[in-house]
Amino acid sequence: MPETRPYHHGDLRAALLAAAERTLRDKGAAALSLRELAREVGVSHAAPGRHFKDKQALLNALAMAGYERLAQTLGAAEDPALPLEPRLAALSRAYLGFAIDNAALLELMYARKHEPDASEQMAAAVEATVGSLVRVLADAQQRGEIIDGDPEELNLVTGAALHGVATFISAGWLTPEAALAGVEDLVHHLLHGLKPR
């Protein structure tokens, strides 16, 4: 058993989230237990209760941490100075890279955002990630790079394509290497359609 050691304010929460993410990745959400996480990080079984009232609170916190990381990932890839096709390709590659490295977490993130008790904080986190692609499409419309229409509806097509590829990777139907190598073609087909030109 790990040696019990004191935590400074905030450290225990971070340690519990890190351990929870490892469990989520290795064994799935059903295997998550506050008691087991306490044992793993070396604290009393009651200690996690100071940060998470129950397993649902832990799952929400994990999802929030995932959205924060995804927002950082997309933010680092975003370059408004680029024309739409390479700009969208960079964002798509960043999203798929996150999905490859965090498949179980991404699944949890999407599941938690639809829960009836999802907080306003969760809605804001979703807006910071999924909403960023809507803003990219709205910006492209203003530049005359894509058709008019509701950017939210156009984003549905983009999001469905990206999440579909992420699901294919997770299911083993597509290798991560093939998915990343095909990003430019995917974005090209999204922007130009499949009809001969």
Image: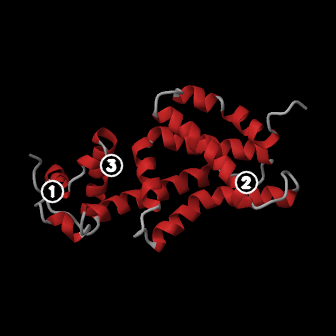
Which sits earlier in the primary sequence, circle 3 or circle 2? Answer: 3
Question: Residue 92 occupies which quadrant of the picture?
Answer: top right
**From the viewer's perspective, is the residue at label 2 or at label 1 nearer?**
2
Crowding at dot 2, Cα within 10 Å, few <14 / some 14-19 / many 20+, comes out as: some
Crowding at dot 1, Cα within 10 Å, few <14 / some 14-19 / many 20+, comes out as: some
Crowding at dot 3, Cα within 10 Å, few <14 / some 14-19 / many 20+, comes out as: many
Looking at the image, residue 66 sits to the left or right of residue 14; the answer is right
Question: Residue 46 occupies which quadrant of the picture?
Answer: bottom left
| Foreground residue among 146 and 86 | 146
Secondary structure under tag 2 reads: helix
| Mark 3 and mark 1: Cα distance apart in space | 15 Å
Which sits earlier in the primary sequence, circle 3 or circle 1? Answer: 3
Residue at the disc numbered 2: 154
Residue at the disc numbered 1: 35
- Are the residues flagged by discs 3 and 2 in contact, CB closer than 8 Å? no
- Are the residues flagged by discs 3 and 1 in contact, CB closer than 8 Å? no
**From the viewer's perspective, is the residue at label 3 or at label 2 nearer?**
2
